[in-house]
Image (spheres, rainbow, N blue to C red):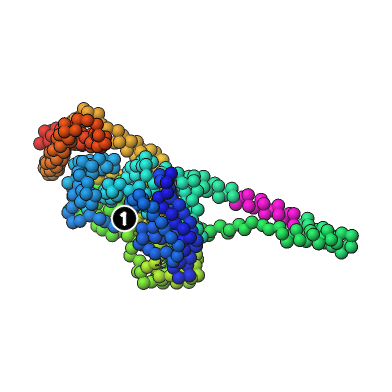
Amino acid sequence: MSTLLQVSQLNKSYGHQVIFEGADLTIAERQKIAVVGRNGAGKSTLFRIITGEETPTSGQVKIHAGTRIGYLTQHSPFQDDESVIDFLTRDSGKPEWECGKIADRFQIKPDLFYVPAESLAGGYQMRIKLISMLLHEPNLLLLDEPTNYLDLSTQILLEKFLQTYNGAFMLISHDREFIKKTCTSTLEIERGETSLYPGSLEDYLAYKAEQTELKEKFNKNVERKKQHLQKFVDRFGAKASKASQAQSKLKQIHKLKTIEILNPLSTARINIPKIEAKQGIALTVDQMTIGYPDKEVAKNINLEVERGEHIAIVGDNGQGKTTFLKTIAGEINALSGQFKWGHNISIGYYAQHTPATLLSDNTVKEHLSNAAGDGVTEQEIFEMAGNFLFKDEFLKKKISVLSGGEKARLCLAGLLLQRHQVLLLDEPTNHLDFETVESLAQGLQNCNSTVLFISHNRTFVDVLATGIIEVKNGQVARYHHNYEEYVYHITQDIEDDLTPPPKTSKKPATDSPQPSDHQTRQRLKEIKKQIRTLENTIQKNETQKLQILKWFEDNPDYNEKFQEKTTQLAEIDKILTDSEATWIKLQEEMEVIG
Ligand SMILES: Nc1ncnc2c1ncn2[C@@H]1O[C@H](COP(=O)(O)OP(=O)(O)OP(=O)(O)O)[C@@H](O)[C@H]1O
Ligand SMILES: [Mg+2]
C-alpha cells in the first residue's frame, strides 16, 4: 500500500494550551480510519492543518503526489436557485450521465435533478455535497462529523457507501455505532499525541484497557519486590557479614522502576438537580395542525405525555420533528387545534441552533452566570461547570475559540442550571464526545423531569427513551414498538429501496382516501413538471448514447478506451431505463388521477 500523507513532529498550541506535541502520523491507501478523541482534543484542528487552513506551530505535513483530498464542507456550496444537476455539473465539470451515476448511489433519482438544491431537506443537501465531493475523484476523504443533523435513512446510506468505498478516509465522529459499521482502523488524539491502531474502535479500547491492566500488574510486582528487598536491608543492613549484600539490595531497589500509568482523563459527570415529583399528564395535544403560513407540516395530532416520561421524537429529515418541538415549546404557533402543558410547568428548550447563538465575546463563566438567573448560588454554578468539565483557566476562555463540542456542552450546562420541569432538546448530542453523550444520557435517565428529545444518535436514544413519537408523512403519533424495532424497520426500508423494483407498476389501492381537488391539481402540476424534466434527461442521454455508439462504429478494434466507453454506455443505459420507468409510472398516475 502506498502512502498518501505523512505528518511528522507536529506541534500546535493555542496560548498555553498544547494541542499537539510531536505528533506523527502516516496514512496509507484504502485505510478506513475513525478519528476519535475528547471534545477539544484537536481533531478538527488536525484536519484544518492537513488542508492548509491552519498552520502548525512547527512540524511538517507532507501530501504525496497522487493524493487527491476530498473535504466535506460544512457550509452550503449552492448558488441561489441552482438546480441539483446544474450544481453537480458546474462544481465537477463532469457530464450529466456521470453525475447521475454517482447520484444514483445516494438515491438521488432523475426526478430530483431539476429541483433547486437549497430547497431540499438537510439530509438530501448532505447527499448532494457528498456526490459533488466524489465527482472530483478523491482518494482520501476527510469527513468532519458528517452524521450531525443527518436523519437515520441518510446515515444508513452513508454507512453503506463508506463500507464499499475503495479509497481511504478519515472520519471524525462521536457516533460509536456509525464508526463500528464503517471503520477498520482507529486514530486516537489524546494528550497532544496521535496513535493509529490497526483495528476497530472496540478492539482499540479493549487493547488500551488490557495495557493498563498489564501495567498495573507489573507495578504491583515491582512494589512487592521492593518491599522484600527493603525488609532484607532493614534486617541485615547493620550486620557486618551481610552489609555488602544489603548495599547491593539497596542499589536494586533504586533500579526497580514502575511504569507510569496516566491518570484517566476526567469525564463529565452530569448530575441534574431533581425537581419536585408530581404525577399526571404533562402534555396534551388535541387535534393540532402544525406548520407555517404557506406550508402545512402535519395535522390531526392527538397525543399525551405523562410527567417523567422520556420521549424520543424520531423520523427523517424534513418530516417535521423540529416543527413539532418548536410548536410545543411555544416558539411558533400551531396552525389550528391546541396543546396544553400541565399546571405550573416551566419549559427549557435547546434548539439545533442554540450553540450558534452564544455570545462569542463572553467567557465560559460569564455565560453560565447569565444563564443561571436568580436564586442559583455561585457554588452551584461552579458545580454545574465542573460537571461539564469547565474548570480553572477554561472558565476564562472566550466562547469564540471553543470547539464544536465545548460550545454544545456549555449551552447544556446553562440550560440545566435553570431547573425546568420539562426539557425539550433538539439534537443535544451533536458534537458531544462519547463519554459526554453517555453521561448526558445517564444524567437525563436519572432525572425526573419530563424530557422530549430529538436525536439521531442511536446509543443515546437506546439508553434514554422510555417511549417514541414518530413524525412521518404528515402525521405525528406515538410509535408502539421499541427503538430497536424502529431502527430495524428503517434499515429494511433502505435495503428494499436499494434493490431495483419489479418491472410491474403498482396500481393505487382503490380504497385509499380521495385527495381533495386542490391536492389533485397540485399533484398533476408536479407530475407534469417531473415528466418535462425526465424528457429532458432522456433526450440528453439519448444524444450521448448515439455519440458513444458512433465511437464504437469508428473504432471497431479494441483500444485502451474501449473499457471506459463500455462503462459509460452501461451507465447511460441505466439512467435511460430508470428515467423511462419513472416516466411510464408518472403517465399512469396522471391517467388515474387526471
Ligand atoms: N483560535 C483558538 N484560540 C484558542 N483556543 C483554540 C482556538 N482554536 C481552537 N482552540 C482550542 O483548541 C482545542 C481543540 O479544538 P478542536 O476544534 O480541534 O477540537 P476537536 O477535537 O475538533 O473537538 P470537538 O470534538 O468538540 O469538535 C479546543 O479546546 C479549543 O477550545
Ligand atoms: Mg471538531
Say if 242 sits above or below 477 in the image: below
Which residue occupies the foreground of this view, 302 or 321?
321
Q: Residue at x 50, y 48 (%)?
A: 197
Q: Residue at x 29, y 40 (%)?
A: 105
Residue 421 lies in what quarter of the image?
bottom left
Q: Dot 1: within a 10 Å radius of its alpha carbon, few (fewer than 14), some, or many (20 or more) residues?
A: some
Say if 215 sits above or below 473 in the image: below
Residue 308 relative to residue 71: left or right: right
Q: Which residues are magenta?
A: 212-226
Q: Residue 424: where, in percent of width, then height?
A: 36, 56
Residue 237 lies in what quarter of the image?
bottom right
Q: Residue at x 19, y 41 (%)?
A: 111
Please say whether residue 499 is visible from this viewpoint.
yes
Q: Quadrant of the C terminus?
A: top left
Q: Quadrant of the N terminus?
A: top left
Q: Residue 81: where, in percent of width, then height?
A: 17, 54
Please say whether residue 443 is visible from this viewpoint.
no
Q: Residue 530: where, in percent of width, then height?
A: 15, 41
Residue 212 relative to residue 386: left or right: right
Q: Residue 165: where, in percent of width, then height?
A: 36, 42
**Amino acid under disc 1:** Thr
Which residue occupies the foreground of this view, 221 or 428?
221
State whether the magenta stretch is mostly helix, strand or loop. Answer: helix
Circle 1 SS class: loop
Which residue occupies the foreground of this view, 95 or 35?
95
Which residue occupies the foreground of this view, 558 or 213?
558
Q: Which residue is mark 1?
A: 73
Please say whether residue 411 is one of the residues in the magenta stretch. no
Please say whether residue 218 is one of the residues in the magenta stretch. yes
